[in-house]
């Protein structure tokens, strides 16, 4: 029986063909899961898409899988159906596989997907495969079950550190998924972002405006510079798995930067600890003790991953030689009788805006991928073909992969999660897609104290070393350092000591915490941690959870200097601010009960600068 298994990952796609092994799809065992739409409507895939991205970055999407919950993705001025983007990747795989069949046909095509995906996402994957011209029986395979099939009949855990998310699944000896979990803000792309922000803290002062253009590119040249830097960061991250330090080449006017493995590990350790905590929680929820922890995903090559798991979990994980290809390889040997699929959909990773979007599925996907000139409206239908003179076998000689009229789910694969395992009282599931702060929304009218003098407008401001050692708190809970950061905010009252900083979607932030209500739905938390790195990492974790556009800027005042990042989502505004060289940070929030959709990051930033930022 000829079986093709395809692992469409966020960053890379891998294909394995029975009796052949890993297929060389795009010059290597992994093909970038990226697409680029030419002005003439030709849809490029993989490394060719990456090369073309420098021409016009707005026409490029590096990670279409991240948008699985959208109807379309915007490439240039075209709203391309997400099905077409995914289908183009599958079609490129078929171009490489078809000559290997030597006129034969595929009996099964096994398409892997995250275990958390429900029917809606799986159906979108299957319809894209049909759109790409994949014939034979399509079998959806959860990634965790694919990996477990290589581990023998033993209970195990799959630790999947992907580009976009971290996923964990615990399976019994029969490869049934007993429990799973996910962190939407921990992945390889988040590591790249952490590296970018780390470098920015050391060099952005040379040209603050230039650095902002890298963070929020406007012109084509800005986008090119950012894409080049992103690639440099990815390579640096990979090299630091083997080397103690690397040089990162920076775009002008910035000079190259040396990054050490120790610096990278300090940045990512808090996130890795969160992954191990989720692993432990998932194991408890499953009610079984895994004999092995299998590492999946290219980011697992970092030595610190296995080290943290061993430290926190007490199990030395199994690290395959090729973590990028293990899912596709495992899908080849899965016993179909053991496949269980999640019966319900989770909350979408992306929520469509209220505007009604019509995105008809195109009748064929291949490349060249021409925009249909006869279709008008905001979402033109994409159609066309991938001409391939080398294609033979069940597909037409022109390489045009015709769409079948239906996208049937595999009727032979069904099932659900077992429900008869011991349940423990666990913390509520986190929503890592929003920043919602657990602070009361009461409006407090400030009693302005005329003539009040802020106590730290004096030359004896506390030093950075004193911040670490002085934990004496006043009646409102402030240490000297926290009061220096708070400026005049405490003068109006409404501040009190808190046990921890409460942030939905994250672990409680421990330390010395003071919570202040201000006015008009605004509140602020001041947090003193045990180290500068701890403060920066906590602030970065909050900033990473921003799923919308954000405002970033530097600030100075009251003998301090630092930076802030602001964003809004669903009527909640969040601004996180840090103080350079000090083990403390703050979180400003705004709960807009009325006109929530009108709340913008600029409004939060303006309020911070006018009301919360400590003055001189």
Image (tube, rainbow, N blue to C red):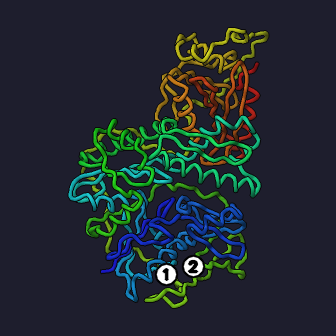
Q: Which residue sits at x=57%, y=21%?
A: 514
Position in image of residue 44 (x %, y %): 61, 72
Tell me, yes or no, if residue 190 can be seen here: no
| Above-or-below relation of 168 to 464 | below
Tell me, yes or no, if residue 279 can be seen here: yes
| Above-or-below relation of 608 to 428 | above
Q: Residues within 10 Å of mark 1 (few under 14, many from 20)?
A: many
Q: Earlier in the sequence, mark 2 or mark 1?
A: 1
Q: What residue is shown with label 1?
A: 133
| Residue at disc 2, secondary structure | loop
Q: Which residue sits at x=70%, y=79%?
A: 375
Position in image of residue 71 (x %, y %): 59, 65
Of residues 607 and 74, the one nearer the viewer is 74
Q: Which residue sits at x=38%, y=71%?
A: 16
Look at the image and tell me in which quarter the N terminus lies: bottom left
Position in image of residue 122 (x %, y %): 44, 66
Q: Are marks 2 and 1 in contact (CB under 8 Å)?
A: yes
Distance, label 2 to label 1, CA atoms, is 9 Å
Q: What residue is shown with label 2?
A: 366
**Extreme residue in the right direction:** 451
Position in image of residue 608 (x %, y %): 71, 30
| Residue at disc 1, secondary structure | loop
Look at the image and tell me in which quarter the C terminus lies: top right
């Amino acid at each position: 029986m000829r079986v093709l298994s395809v692992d469409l990952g966020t960053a890379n796609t891998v294909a394995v063909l029975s009796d052949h092994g890993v297929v060389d799809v795009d010059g290597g065992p992994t093909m970038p899961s990226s697409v680029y739409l030419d002005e003439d409507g030709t849809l490029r895939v993989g490394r060719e898409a990456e090369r073309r991205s420098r021409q016009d970055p707005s026409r490029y999407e590096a990670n279409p899988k991240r948008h699985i919950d959208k109807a379309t993705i915007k490439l240039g001025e075209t709203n391309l159906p997400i099905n077409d983007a995914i289908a183009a990747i599958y079609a490129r795989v078929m171009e490489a596989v078809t000559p290997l069949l030597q006129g034969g046909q595929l009996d099964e095509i096994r398409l892997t997907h995250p275990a958390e995906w429900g029917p809606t996402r799986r159906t979108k994957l299957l319809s894209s495969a049909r759109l790409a011209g994949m014939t034979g029986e399509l079998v959806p395979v959860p990634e965790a079950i694919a990996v477990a099939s290589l581990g023998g009949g033993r209970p195990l855990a799959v630790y999947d550190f992907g580009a976009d998310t971290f996923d964990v699944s615990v399976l019994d000896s029969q490869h049934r998924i007993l429990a799973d979990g996910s962190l939407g803000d921990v992945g390889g792309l988040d590591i790249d972002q952490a590296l970018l922000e780390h470098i920015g803290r050391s060099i952005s002062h040379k040209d603050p405006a230039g650095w902002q253009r890298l963070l929020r590119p406007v012109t084509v040249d800005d986008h090119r510079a950012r894409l080049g830097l992103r690639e440099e960061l990815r390579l640096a991250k990979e090299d630091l798995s083997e080397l103690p330090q690397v040089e990162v080449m920076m775009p002008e006017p910035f000079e190259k930067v040396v990054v050490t493995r120790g610096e990278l590990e300090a940045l990512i350790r808090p996130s890795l600890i969160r992954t191990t905590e989720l692993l432990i929680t998932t194991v408890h929820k499953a009610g079984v003790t895994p004999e092995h922890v299998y590492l999946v995903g290219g980011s697992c090559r970092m030595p610190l991953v296995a080290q943290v798991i061993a430290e926190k979990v007490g199990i030395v994980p199994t690290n395959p030689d090729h973590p990028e290809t293990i899912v596709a390889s495992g899908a080849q040997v899965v016993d179909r009788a053991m496949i269980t699929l999640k019966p319900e959909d989770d909350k979408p990773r992306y929520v469509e805006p209220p505007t009604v979007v019509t995105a008809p599925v195109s009748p064929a996907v291949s490349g060249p991928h021409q925009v249909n000139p006869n279709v008008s409206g905001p979402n033109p239908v994409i159609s066309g073909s991938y001409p391939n003179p080398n294609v033979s076998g069940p597909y037409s000689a022109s390489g045009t992969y015709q769409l079948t009229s239906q996208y049937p789910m595999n009727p032979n694969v069904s099932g659900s999660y077992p429900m008869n395992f011991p349940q423990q009282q666990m913390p509520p599931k986190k929503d890592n897609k929003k920043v919602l702060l657990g602070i009361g929304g009461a409006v407090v009218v400030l009693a302005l104290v005329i003539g009040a003098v802020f106590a730290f407008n004096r030359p004896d401001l506390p030093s950075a070393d004193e911040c670490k050692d002085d934990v004496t708190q006043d009646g409102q809970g402030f240490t000297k350092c926290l009061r220096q950061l708070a400026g005049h905010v405490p003068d109006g009252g409404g501040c009190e000591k808190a046990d921890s900083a409460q942030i939905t979607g994250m672990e409680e932030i421990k330390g010395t915490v003071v919570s202040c209500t201000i006015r008009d739905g605004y509140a602020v938390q001041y947090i003193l941690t045990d180290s500068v790195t701890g403060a920066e990492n906590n602030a970065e974790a909050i900033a990473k959870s921003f799923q919308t556009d954000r405002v970033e800027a530097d600030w100075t005042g009251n003998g301090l200097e630092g930076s802030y990042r602001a964003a809004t989502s669903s009527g909640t505004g969040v601004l996180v601010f840090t103080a350079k060289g000090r083990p403390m940070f703050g979180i400003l929030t705004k709960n807009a009960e009325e006109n929530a959709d009108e709340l913008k990051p600029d409004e939060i930033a303006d309020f911070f600068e006018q009301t919360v930022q400590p003055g001189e």
